[in-house]
Image: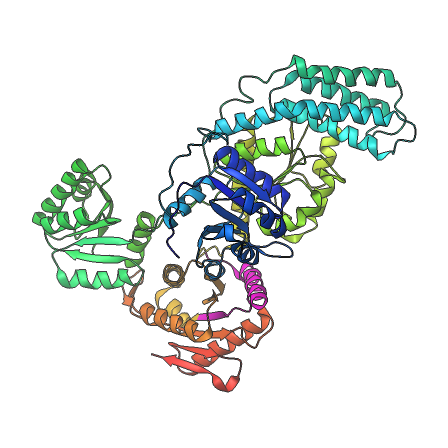
Amino acid sequence: MAQMTAAALTRILYVDDDPDIRQVAKLALGVVGGFTLECCSCAEEALRALPQFRPDLILLDVMMPGMDGPTTLAKLRELPEASGIPAMFMTAKVQPQEIAGLEHDGVLGVIAKPFDPMTLAQTVRKLWSAGTAQVVPRNDASPRPPPAGNANALEQITEEFVRSLPGKLEEIASLWRSVNEEGAPPDLLDTLHRKVHSLVGSAGTFGLGRVAEAARALERELKRTSGTRPSPNLGDSSQLAGLVHELVCSAGQSRPSASPAPALPPSISEPADSADENKAIYLFADQAEWADGLSDQLENYGFEVRSLHSPEELAQACARRVPAAVMTQLESQRLYRVSAQAASRWRESSPAPPPVIFISDRDDLDSRLQAAQAGGVAYFTLPVKVSSLVDRLDQLCVRKETEPYRVMIVEDAEEQSAFYSAVLTQAGMLTCVVSDPRRLLEQLEEFHPEFVLMDMYLPQCSGDDLARVIRQMDAFVSLPIVFLSVETDFDRQLSAMELGGDEFLTKPILPAQLVSVVASRVKRYRTLRALMIQDSLTGLANHSRLHQLLETEVARALRQNRPLSLAMIDVDHFKQVNDRHGHPTGDRILQELARFLRQRLRQADVVARYGGEEFAVVMSNTEGANALMVMDRLRNQFATLTHESDKGESFPVTFSAGVAELSGLATARELVLAADRALYQAKDRGRNCAVLRSAEPTADKAVEA
């Protein structure tokens, strides 16, 4: 990526065809980030706006109708005023190969969609700093300064709602006047009812109690005189006119409460840490041969092991780089005292010393107590079971990333959706706002929500109608749907839940209650989903989940004309392992192979248990020859590992692999059959080898031990 120089980043030209995302970007970059923002919906608007706006940065969506993001950027670069202006892209397609295709001269980075509104400005500044000169604080007074935090952002949303309230009330009054005119269209009454209904919830949400009460009284009377859906027969229109007048007057008699709700809850779903995993392990031992053997075993699981032989050498190594863990092997009282004293000094001198694992030939209580008092987090006795040691090191070294909860908000009232989004974002969740029900299916497929917060009354349809649509789709049958509405009719609430909803919340709702409901539902959803898509023994994707993912990857590879390979793996002579060492040992072999594959393959690769002792690996953007090389390297490394039975017997295990490339094939099923045939060829050739099956059967290649 090219390094560029610029002054302060203050002005951003943002191009995105989605009006909802543009609105969120205004909040994220303008209100929260403090940038001066010019939003355009297409390339033509951007070409007209750029010469006058003179941005410091061009931020574009990739997928746009007509002229996509890269083409739009190329057109903008033809303008003399755009010379040297850096750019960033935003996209929901975050595969490494797709990102690499977007990063070229003058492009500072690619931001994944959906983005977090509260951290988008921070992400933009980080990419700017990495690719340009350091960003300096703003010194112009034209845009509003960034608020101090999420609470200020919520205050900003409240202030914007209060400023827009007179216009909303005038719109309701105008609708009322139009409804009473002769020949008024019937759907005008639906519009009036929906506007009043929306105001009940939004006014309550933002602490305008008088307005909310007046709107609720008007809505109640509209429903009483006209039925559930208003009709031209308005009954006592004078009473309704009085309620309309009272509603309009309520704006001048109501002020938002000091806070629209109690203090926001703390974050419960922090985004995954992007820092690299620390796999460095220091081994402090007095037996060089034993230490070398253990190092070889651990390095095959991806750990970086360094053997050290004195307390001074250990201290010097830690001063240069703090490891993820220190292992001390103790076979004498002298070595125990030395390592225990070193660990104690460590804990006293370092605010965050690395965890220490003690390995000893002694298994008495005194030794374990002394190890614990010296700061030991684990204690293993010789001979060490490598699988158990790897499990413990995984817990210490591998970051268990918690993915943010993904919440879809279906709400046509812009202020309310912005409020709910800000509350949930502050709690560490990702949100996607759908204001137009016609875009629901598209957003479901793109965003993959884990929770849907649904308003009951929407333009063109009701919330329970949308819930039924969602429940028609197999992929979203178990997706939690919670209705949020001012509806107080208990029978109406029960009816909505019978049609597909899981719970009904009444507006206005406290932020803490909203976060609690979402968090509990998503936790349960994740637990149930894990049971459905994960193999219970290995934690890998199960057979059905593999086929779902493979179908997706095959469709993407064919659409983008990119390579894709599938490897089928089978543990050699697995029945003999079970017969000789027992099924518990066989289960551990499968668990160790699963862990080995996860740690040695790319994060983008899909690793699954196909069934029994068979595994599958889907490698995107990988040609067959390269996939064969990867499988052969893994096969050789796994063959060097030593496994232990419950009786203490040590033995090696090997596997065979069949690899197939998508080239020349048309479906996921054909790819599976091709990889399976290659696996059978590997077995026929004596096992412990990898075979590549290309499009031509005569071109099969094998790599053997």
Q: Toward the viewer: 355 or 15?
A: 15
Residue 552 belongs to magenta span? yes
Instruction: Look at 39% across and 46% down and name the residue there.
Output: 6
Residue beneath the point at 46% across and 70% down? 567
Q: Position of residue 251 (x, y in %)?
A: 67, 17
Which residue lies most toward the front here?
80
Instruction: Look at the image and tell me whether residue 524 can be seen.
Output: no
Residue 470 in picture, x, y percent from top left: 68, 47
The residue lying toward the viewer, choosing from 404 and 544, is 404
- Residue 223's x, y, as percent? 81, 25
Q: Residue at x 66, y 40 (%)?
A: 435
In the image, which residues are magenta?
Answer: 540-569
Q: Where residue 311 appears, x then y in whole percent?
A: 10, 48
Rendered-image quadrant of the N terminus: bottom left
Q: Determine if residue 50 is in view.
A: yes
Magenta-colored segment: predominant secondary structure: helix
Residue 275 position (above or below residue 488): below
